[in-house]
């Protein structure tokens, strides 16, 4: 269940980081980097929960 929570949050951050700006109201460069870093962190947390081997 926790993996689904992290995957959902990661997907949300990924969409926020990749969405195009509409009329100049899109996220700035630092916001995009932050959102994509959070998506990467969420993916890493899902992988850390998997048993190794």
Image (cartoon, rainbow, N blue to C red):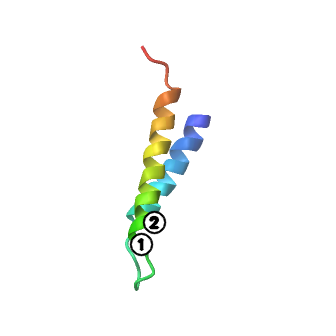
Query: Which percent across, then down, holds residue 35?
Result: 46, 58
Which disc number belongs to residue 47? none
Query: Which percent across, then down, holds residue 29?
Result: 38, 68
Which disc number belongs to residue 28? 1
For disc 2, the neighbor class at 10 Å (few under 14, some 14 to 19, many from 20) is: few
Image quarter of residue 25: bottom left
Q: Which residue is mark 2?
A: 31
Q: Which residue shows up at 42% across the image and 13% down it?
A: 53
Q: Which residue shows up at 47% across the image and 43% down it?
A: 41
Q: Which residue shows up at 51% across the image and 56% down it?
A: 12
Q: Secondary structure at mark 2?
A: helix
The answer to whether residue 20 is left or right of residue 6 is: left
Between residue 27 and residue 7, name the one nearer to us: 27
For disc 1, the neighbor class at 10 Å (few under 14, some 14 to 19, many from 20) is: few
Q: Secondary structure at mark 1?
A: loop
Instruction: Verify CB contact (< 8 Å) between mark 2 and mark 1.
Output: yes
Residue at the front extreme, as displayed? 30
Distance of label 2 from label 1 (alpha carbons):
5 Å
Residue at the right extreme, as displayed? 1
Q: Which corner quadrant holds the N terminus?
A: top right
Number of marks in the rendered image: 2
Q: Which residue shows up at 42% across the image and 66% down it?
A: 30
Placement of 39 over or under 24, stated as above or below: above
């Amino acid at each position: 269940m926790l993996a689904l929570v992290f995957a959902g949050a990661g997907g949300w951050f990924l969409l926020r980081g990749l969405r195009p700006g509409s009329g100049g109201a899109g996220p700035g460069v630092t916001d995009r980097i932050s959102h994509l870093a959070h998506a990467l962190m969420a993916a890493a947390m899902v992988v850390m929960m998997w048993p190794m081997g």
